[in-house]
Amino acid sequence: MNKNIDMSLNNLGTCFFLMFQIVDFKMGHNLILMSLKLKEMFNN
């Protein structure tokens, strides 16, 4: 019984970890795009 609970908790942890990694990647991508746009604005 305890083993099953540990396994499901482990799976939940991996799912959250992957979700956060994807969110971080998207946020980082948006930040890079925003900084590039700001650079273009300042150059013009």
Image: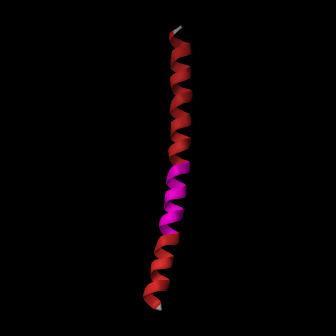
Q: Residue furthest left?
A: 42
Q: Is residue 19 magenta?
A: no
Q: Residue furthest bottom?
A: 44
Span shown in magenta? 22-32
Task: Check the image and report above or below for 5 versus 39.
Answer: above
User: Observer-nearest residue: 8 or 31?
Assistant: 31
Q: Is the magenta region chiefly helix, strand or loop? A: helix
Task: Check the image and report above or below for 36 versus 13.
Answer: below
The residue at 55%/21% (across/down) is: 8
Give the color scheme: rainbow, by chain, secondary structure or one colour: secondary structure
The residue at 46%/74% (across/down) is: 35
Task: Check the image and report above or below for 41 versus 34.
Answer: below
Q: Is residue 27 magenta?
A: yes
The residue at 55%/35% (across/down) is: 14
Residue 16 x, y percent position in the rendering? 51, 37
User: Observer-nearest residue: 23 or 11?
Assistant: 23
Q: Residue furthest top?
A: 1
Residue 30 x, y percent position in the rendering? 51, 64
The residue at 49%/58% (across/down) is: 27
Task: Check the image and report above or below for 3 versus 21.
Answer: above
**Total numbered labels placed on residues in the image:** 0
Residue 34 x, y percent position in the rendering? 48, 71
